[in-house]
Image (spheres, rainbow, N blue to C red):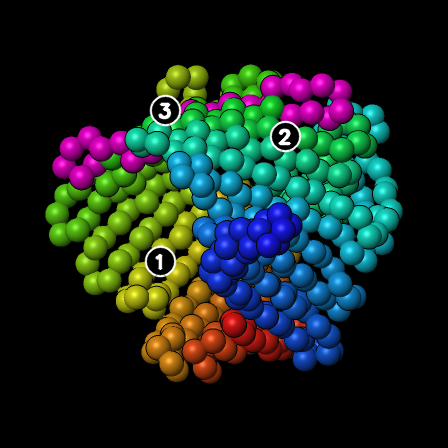
Amino acid sequence: MNRLGIALVCLATVTLPSWAQITLSGSWEMSLALLPSTALEKAVLTLSMGFSGWTVSSVSTFNNSGFAHQEFQLKGTFGFFSVSGAMAFNPTNSSTVTVQFPPGCTPQTASFTLNPPEYSWAWIKPEFSFAGVTFSAMVEHWLYPYIPPYAPEATLNCNPNITGEICWPCCESTSYMRYTLMAAVPPISFTGRFEDCCTGIVFKDFSIKLTNVSLCCGVAYNAELYFTKAGFQYVKFTGLNLLGICCGFSLDISATFTAGGKEVTVTPKWQGLGDVCVQVFGDVLMNGYTFSGLAIYGYRIKCTLGDCNFIEFLTVVDLSNIDEVERIVGDIFTGDEYELIRFGLCGQGCCGGKYHVRVDVYFAQSGSLFDISRALVRTEIPLLANLVFTGSFGLPALGAPTLSVGMIFKF
């Protein structure tokens, strides 16, 4: 046998066992709007290949306009090291977007027409863990004006009067790079971030966190100190299971102190009939260094009655503070809505799965009977071991109802 033949045999001996360990999996998720008109809302095809502790995935997203988004993901381990990353592309979207730059930039806004197909963004994160100590370094690259959906900047509302506005982190309309360094030894962790707007690497922000530090009698606390290149931003203290009295009653208190004010969240808890949790959103009022009262923005009461059966009440006391409440609970209200009642139900479904039903009832000052503005029902019902039916039905007080159906198929 010649040398080439010997080499091929050796290569096959090494690679064939690895190929034999390859696993293929995936899923197909689709949602179709039937009312008020028929349209494809979203379809996501995920294909994954696993081999020797590594997984490579392709996630393709489609909507009513066609091929909307393509992302490739990587995840794996090698001894004490693990690596994860992703890269995304814009296949077909050629729309014109509005970009807003940070305060102090000139100009403040700009219009940009996307030019597909093109690369959008990428990140990679190596991590090392040994003896309870974790070190990681994350490197990100964003092509102007694409912002990854996982980034905090993607959730910023630059201008509430402009829908779909992009908050670009630089004054320059160039690519952006961010470097995140993290070290953690429970219960303390340090995170530092640096950024580059093609003008050189500069410091962005730094945070120190203490998580679940136990004191005594089941009482614990969290703390976080955060500052940026502009200086101190906030310090936050959260006390867990404070003032434990009896019969499962306890109290969590979270206080955030910023350079311009203070905020407090009070969460009474009762482990009685199910799990009843009360959150109060507000601010501490100070007159100089003297405590003068509390400003209440809103409150939430959630009663968990079982594994996934619950009822929840979320109320904004003053509509002028709705942005403060939504900053904590998420953007869930529209117009002059001020209250939400949510019901969650679940039970045993087909093939060992569980069905889930969620009913949301919204209330607004401009609502109809009992101030009801709209209702929304979402369902997930397993039909087979690898097939789930999904549905969403919305009924506004004024306007046409909405109906969407879909499925999640895993293979």
Height in image: 230 above or below 341?
above
Q: Give the Cα separation between the discs numbered 3 and 1.
A: 30 Å
Q: Is residue 43 above or below residue 101?
A: below
Residues shaded magenta: 195-219
Quarter of the image where one finds residue 296: top left
Residue depicted at 28% across the width and 57% down the height: 276
Please state which amino acid type lies under the numbered disc 1: Lys
SS class, disc 1 = strand
Disc 1 and disc 2 in contact, CB within 8 angstroms:
no
Per the rendering, the mark at residue 302 is 1
* Residue type, label 3: Phe
Q: Residues within 10 Å of mark 3 (few under 14, many from 20)?
A: few
- Which quadrant does the N terminus fall into? bottom right
Can you identify the residue that label 2 sits on?
A: 178
Q: Nearer the viewer, mark 1 or mark 2?
A: 2
**At 58% across and 43% down in the image, what residue appears?**
85
Q: Which mark is residue 291?
A: 3
> Which amino acid type corresponds to the residue marked 2 in the rendered image?
Arg
Q: Are marks 3 and 1 in contact (CB under 8 Å)?
A: no
Picture coordinates of residue 233, whole percent (x, y) = 52, 23
Q: Position of residue 303 (x, y in %)?
A: 32, 61
Residue name at image x 78 percent, y 56 percent: 91
Residue 312 lies in the magenta-colored region? no
